[in-house]
Image: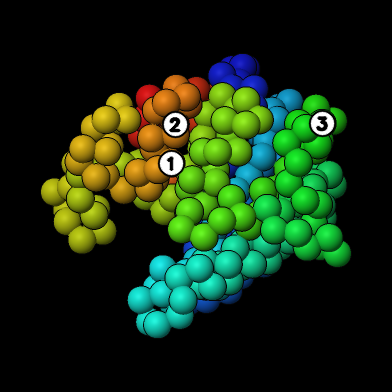
């Protein structure tokens, strides 16, 4: 049996990953399927932390364009990520996996405050940690939150879960001749403005030599394949 190539990972999920084929909200079956994939790698002895977006419930940037104050819109988006984190926590704990939600906004009735040393301790005790509410600051995306938290906890990699099987030079859904990249460096991503993560997140990863693997979450078992070092998706390093 292959051995895992990573010991500690941050899994970045979009909010849309939880909605499945629904146009809005959460599909509990999809949440359970994602939780099962996470449990599968956790059983390999991997330290797992997750950062989830909130786009299935509320998108701050779109709301700001529609007239809501940008800071207010971003805070609402942060609350959406707390909701999604609680959904995933419930799905994981129904599978017998101990989890903790840590929020960058203080909501003590629902989640622990984000404290780095406490997060590290949870991981050492083989608990999965869900980082909610982004960085706690407006104008920063959950991509940036994932990069920041990954660096803080000493993760080996960010696993960016998407609906496509890697990074392309253009939208593969719209263009049949879209070219997939197997390997990229940070500067290529920034220069070509490729849709990997936002520029702030990519710059953080570049400055701290933190690799990113972009892969298709909708194919069952892909998280495990990435962990075992199989050549799927696109690696940015």
Quadrant for the C terminus, please: top left
Q: Position of residue 43 (x, y in %)?
A: 74, 32
**SS at badge 2:** helix
In the image, what residue occupies the spot 44% across and 34% down? 204
Q: Position of residue 142 (x, y in %)?
A: 52, 52
State the scheme by which the image is colored: rainbow
Task: State if disc 1 and disc 2 touch (CB < 8 Å).
Answer: yes
Is residue 36 visible to us here?
no
Q: Dot 1, how many residues are within 10 Å of its Cα: few (below 14), some (14-19), or many (20+)?
A: some
In the image, what residue occupies the spot 73% across and 26% down? 45
121 w.r.t. 33: above or below: above
- On residue 121, the disc is 3
The residue furthest bottom is: 67
Q: Dot 2, how many residues are within 10 Å of its Cα: few (below 14), some (14-19), or many (20+)?
A: many
- On residue 82, the disc is none
Residue that carries the numbered disc 2 in the rendered image = 205
Among the two numbered marks 2 and 3 on one chain, the one whose residue lies closer to the N terminus? 3
Residue that carries the numbered disc 1 in the rendered image = 201
Q: Position of residue 205 (x, y in %)?
A: 44, 31
| Among the 4 quarters of the image, the one containing residue 149 | top right
**SS at badge 1:** helix
Task: State if disc 3 and disc 1 touch (CB < 8 Å).
Answer: no
Could you give the CA–CA distance between mark 2 and mark 1, rounded to whole angstroms?
6 Å
Is 153 in front, or is 221? 153
Is 160 in front, or is 175? 160
Is residue 207 visible to us here?
yes
In the image, what residue occupies the spot 54% across and 43% down? 146
In the image, what residue occupies the spot 41% across and 68% down? 61
Could you give the CA–CA distance between mark 1 and mark 3, rounded to whole angstroms?
25 Å
């Amino acid at each position: 049996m292959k051995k895992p190539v990573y010991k500690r990972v941050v899994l970045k999920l979009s909010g849309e990953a939880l909605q499945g084929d629904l146009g809005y909200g959460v599909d509990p079956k999809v949440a359970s399927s994602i939780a099962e994939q996470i449990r599968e790698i956790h059983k390999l002895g991997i330290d797992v932390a997750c950062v989830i977006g909130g786009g299935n419930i509320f998108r701050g940037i779109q709301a700001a364009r529609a007239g809501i104050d940008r800071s207010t819109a971003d805070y609402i988006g942060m609350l959406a990520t707390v909701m999604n984190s609680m959904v995933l926590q419930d799905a994981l704990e129904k599978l017998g996996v101990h989890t903790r939600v840590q929020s960058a906004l203080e909501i003590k009735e629902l989640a622990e405050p984000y404290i780095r040393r406490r997060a590290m301790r949870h991981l050492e005790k083989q608990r999965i940690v869900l980082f909610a509410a982004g960085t706690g600051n407006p104008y920063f995306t959950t991509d940036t939150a994932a990069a920041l938290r990954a660096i803080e906890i000493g993760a080996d990699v960010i696993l960016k879960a998407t609906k496509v099987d890697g990074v392309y030079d253009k939208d593969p859904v719209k263009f049949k001749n879209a070219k997939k990249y197997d390997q990229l460096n940070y500067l290529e991503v920034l220069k070509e403005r490729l849709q990997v993560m936002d520029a702030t997140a990519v710059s953080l990863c570049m400055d701290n030599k933190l690799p990113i693997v972009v892969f298709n979450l909708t194919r069952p078992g892909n998280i495990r394949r990435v962990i075992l070092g199989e050549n799927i998706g696109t690696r940015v390093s």
